[in-house]
């Protein structure tokens, strides 16, 4: 797991635009933190089972984030699968699409190759997260861009500080809820889902 952040100033310049699919309008990335702090969760794809589970985990913080004036935003690299993701209610926040994937490139979210994605997707972290998703009734599919990785960006109001810049090394990597609350200096009683012990009977995808 690679985690980059806690910088004193915004050093990563991201000037891409997201397309808000429901409204069919473009929004500058910087506008999302202009008036409030923001937690930006970058999904690998909307149909990804593990991503859906991660979104549901992060959403446990939403009441505390909202009470503290912090926005929760999800970003996907393509519109494919968005409708099902929204209907599933996996993320309790605004959802945007960066179809050009410019922000993904600017933030260092890597792309797998056809050869590297298979061992990455079969890694223990992914299997553990998939097992937990299965236990909670969260399903996924293999449609869309399978090669994109994701991460998270937490930015203070006005973009004065990047509080957290997290880059997935494995598709199963994610930021613990307590770490998100800590960098924002907020209190939360949200309880993270416990990763189960992984074995062939519960982790086979």
Image: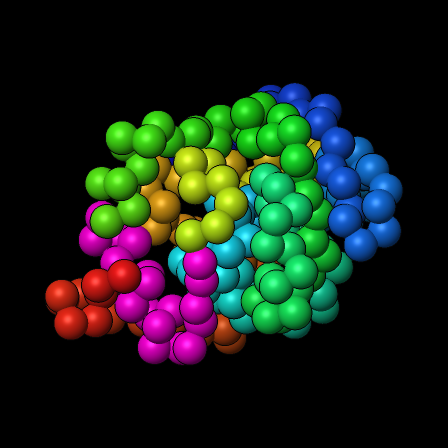
Coloring applied to the structure? rainbow
Image quadrant holding the N terminus, namely top left
The residue that appears at 49% across and 27% down in the rendered structure is 108
Which quarter of the picture shows residue 107? top right
- Residue stretch in magenta: 123-141
Q: In the rendering, at what x and y percent does residue 3 appear?
A: 40, 37
Please give left or right for residue 175 compared with residue 94 in the image.
Answer: left
Q: In the rendering, at what x and y percent does residue 100 appear?
A: 65, 29
Q: Does the rendering let one see residue 106?
A: yes
Furthest residue toward front: 143
The residue that appears at 84% across and 46% down in the rendered structure is 24
The residue that appears at 72% across and 68% down in the rendered structure is 67
**Magenta span: chief secondary structure:** helix
Image quadrant holding the C terminus, namely bottom left
In this view, the residue in front, 54 or 141, is 141
The residue that appears at 65% across and 22% down in the rendered structure is 13
Q: Does the rendering let one see residue 39?
A: no
Which quarter of the picture shows residue 204? bottom left
Please give left or right for residue 157 compared with residue 23 in the image.
Answer: left
Which quarter of the picture shows residue 201? bottom left
Furthest residue toward left: 200
Please give left or right for residue 180 compared with residue 9 in the image.
Answer: left
Q: In the rendering, at what x and y percent does residue 144 appear?
A: 51, 45
Q: In the rendering, at what x and y percent does residue 163 appear?
A: 57, 40
Numbered marks: total: 0
> Is residue 126 located in the magenta-colored stretch of the structure?
yes
> Is residue 112 located in the magenta-colored stretch of the structure?
no
């Amino acid at each position: 797991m690679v985690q980059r952040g806690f910088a004193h100033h915004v050093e990563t310049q991201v000037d891409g635009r997201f397309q808000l699919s429901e409204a069919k309008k473009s929004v500058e990335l910087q506008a999302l933190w202009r008036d409030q702090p923001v937690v930006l969760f970058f999904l690998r794809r909307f149909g990804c089972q593990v991503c859906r589970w991660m979104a549901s985990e992060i959403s446990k913080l939403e009441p505390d984030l909202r009470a503290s004036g912090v926005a929760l935003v999800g970003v996907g690299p393509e519109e494919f699968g968005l409708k099902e993701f929204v209907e599933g209610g996996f993320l309790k926040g605004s959802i945007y699409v960066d179809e050009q994937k410019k922000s993904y490139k600017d933030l260092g979210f890597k792309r797998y190759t056809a050869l590297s994605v298979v061992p990455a997707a079969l890694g223990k972290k992914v299997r553990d997260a998939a097992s937990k998703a299965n236990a909670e009734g969260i399903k996924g599919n293999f449609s869309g861009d399978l090669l994109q990785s994701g991460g998270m960006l937490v930015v203070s109001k006005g973009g004065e500080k990047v509080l957290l810049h997290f880059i997935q090394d494995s598709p199963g990597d994610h930021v613990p809820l307590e770490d998100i609350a800590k960098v924002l200096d907020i209190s939360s009683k949200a309880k993270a889902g416990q990763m189960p012990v992984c074995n062939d009977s519960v982790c086979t995808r």
